[in-house]
Amino acid sequence: MTFTRIDPNTVQSNGGFTVQAVRIHDVKYSNALHSVTIPGEILVGDPAYVIYLSALKRWDPPGSQTSIDPAEKKEIADNVVQALQFMGVRFVVE
């Protein structure tokens, strides 16, 4: 998988998704059909960031009535981890 930096806070994958750092602490994952905002938190020290992939439950509106199934959750988690690594973010996943 390869990534292209769209702007300082956004990368796009040739796999058909984007990952964007939004606000100070959240990450937004988007594919062709849906998007989901994943909560995170800035830490003091190293790693500098924690991302709460365990919070993935439902897509953001307008698809908010659609649950994220376990296979989608794993795919999103894998994609977000790869994108953040590409961006050079030092993070942990919970």
Image (cartoon, rainbow, N blue to C red):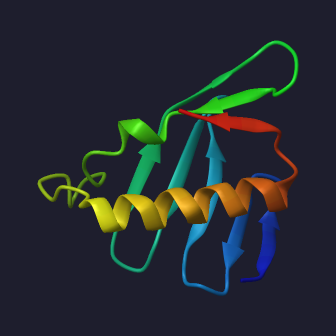
The answer to whether residue 7 is left or right of residue 10 is right
Find residue 69 and report its horizontal and vertical position in percent.
Answer: 24, 61
Find residue 29 and report its horizontal and vertical position in percent.
Answer: 51, 58
Task: Report how many numbered discs are placed on residues in the image.
Answer: 0
Identify whether 63 is placed above or below 56: below
Nearer-the-camera pick, 55 or 20? 55
- The structure residue drawn at horizontal position 82% and vertical position 44%, both measured from the top left corner, is 89
- The structure residue drawn at horizontal position 82% and vertical position 69%, both measured from the top left corner, is 5
Find residue 16 and report its horizontal and vertical position in percent.
Answer: 55, 83
The answer to whether residue 89 is left or right of residue 32 is right
Q: Looking at this rendering, what residue extends furthest in the left direction?
A: 65
Q: Looking at this rendering, what residue extends furthest in the top direction?
A: 44
Nearer-the-camera pick, 45 or 8? 45
Q: Looking at this rendering, what residue extends furthest in the bottom direction?
A: 14
- The structure residue drawn at horizontal position 15% and vertical position 59%, both measured from the top left corner, is 66
**In the rendered image, which quarter contains the N terminus?**
bottom right
- The structure residue drawn at horizontal position 30% and vertical position 51%, both measured from the top left corner, is 60
* Quadrant of residue 56 within the rendered picture: top left
Identify whether 20 is placed above or below 90: below
The answer to whether residue 1 is left or right of residue 93 is right
* Quadrant of residue 65 within the rendered picture: bottom left
